[in-house]
Image (cartoon, grey):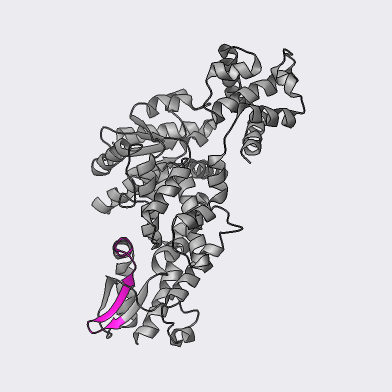
Amino acid sequence: MNLHEFWPECLMRLQQSLPTRQYQMWIAPLTVDETAEGWRVYAKTQFVLTQVKKQFWTEIETLKTELAADAPALALAIGEGRHFQAALAAEAAQAQPVAVGASVVRESAMDIVQKYVRADAVLPLETAAPPTAEVGVKEKDKTKPGHNLQPEFTFDTLVVGKGNEVAVAVARNIAEQPGGDYNPFYLYSSPGLGKTHLVQAIGHALLRAHPKAKVAYMHADDYVRSLMNAAKNQAFDAFKQKYKQYDLLILDDVQFIAGKERTMEEFFYLFNHFQKEKKQLILTGDKLPNDIDEMDVRLKTRFNSGLSLRLEPPELEMRVAILQKKAELAGTQLDEAAAFFIAKHIKGSVRDLEGAFKRVDARSRFTGRAIDIDLVRDALQDIVASSHRVMTAEGIMETVSKYYGIGMNDLTGKKRARNIARPRQMAMALIKELTALSLPAIGHHFDRNHTTVMHAVKAIADLRQEEAQVEQDYQKLLILIKS
């Protein structure tokens, strides 16, 4: 069997044995060629080479022994050779190889990206990421590991900055000494700041140091569904034993078990088991344990018994580093000035930042242009325009009055009817969020003092938590004001 026959067959076997996401990310982009020293498999970057070698090379070498034992030696290197598609049938392996050129590589990348880009929409954080529940149920059986960790969520791919440096240091310590001083480890933040990446990196590091360790990552919703299935099938003993076996259990978004009495009770007993056996528990949430509504008081106390840390939004330098890491993973050349331009305009979550990069990368691949400031400005023109728009109290008040169908004089007048007072409070809260005006300055626009504004801001914040309609109105108004 020659290389042109072996590699398509090898790709087909790997495509069948690996989750689609892993295959598309790590295997499909690999190229091959014959040299004087033997067969070579090429990765575009050192990072990709390292990941392929750690996670997939043993299986590739096994396939080489099985399919082409007498062929030249197979080695992994950085470079670029010929690109092949996986064989679709036995005879497809005889197909002529397709020489790799810039156009072929670009077309292949475009095919992948095009599925997720519609009218320049921002792509999701991880291309083609399947829902957590689907991974746990459908893909788990396809792979040997049962831990459900995403292969790219390691310490090697994690960017460290002021917002997460303490949490990363603690995470590395836990990976080296699980079940020690930081048990449980509770990590919380707003969505999209990298909680899942960091806690899964602990799992990967622990498995690297102790391959026989039993590690599991799951979303809280999956734990709830697992309990419901156990109740349906009257299999509580099997349910309990399933989770007691782990040396490290990572439960993401633990706030989702709040208010579910039986789930909280079972997790209480599981928590006690982990503490007694000195096994490591890692939990993530969107707020401190004491602030989670409807969470069992006993669980709040236990969550607080370990170490709780907050992840902060990334500063400018960290945002630039994240963009550069994403470019490296994508095999894309990202001009440093372009990276700073993106980072200056995308100041929210890491997920927003990565979504913006994917939009820019897609524009580059579709147009064949290098990623520079001009291309970034074109790709992110709506975001850039929004970030430069000047917000004024008058403009916000006008939008609010039109939304609620009342006059501007009602907002500034003395009427206290609810249909007037609520929009007035909403306008004050929005001005506080969207402008740099002080409380007295805001009050001046409504002929009120600063304490009235303070009360209005707090009242709207509370109502957004308590009444879904108020939250919907607030979000709609944000969109109207910014558009």
Which one is in front, 225 or 430? 430
Location of the C terminus by quadrant is top right
Image vertical order of residue 334 relative to residue 177, above or below: below
Image vertical order of residue 382 relative to residue 455, above or below: below
Which one is in front, 142 or 320? 320
Residue 471 horizontal side relative to residue 235, left or right: right
Toward which corner of the image does residue 330 lie, by quadrant?
bottom left
Q: Residue at x 41, y 47 (%)?
A: 217
Q: Is residue 36 visible?
A: yes
Image vertical order of residue 348 relative to residue 339, above or below: above
Q: Residue at x 27, y 42 (%)?
A: 172
Residue 476, image x, y percentages: 66, 36
Residue 430, image x, y percentages: 60, 28
Residue 180, image x, y percentages: 25, 35
Residue 156 horizontal side relative to residue 347, left or right: left
Which one is in front, 286 or 29? 29
Q: Residue at x 55, y 28 (%)?
A: 433
Q: Is residue 152 visible?
A: no
Location of the N terminus by quadrant is bottom left
Residue 288, image x, y percentages: 43, 28
Segment colored magenta: 34-49
Which one is in front, 470 or 483? 483
Q: How many marks?
A: 0
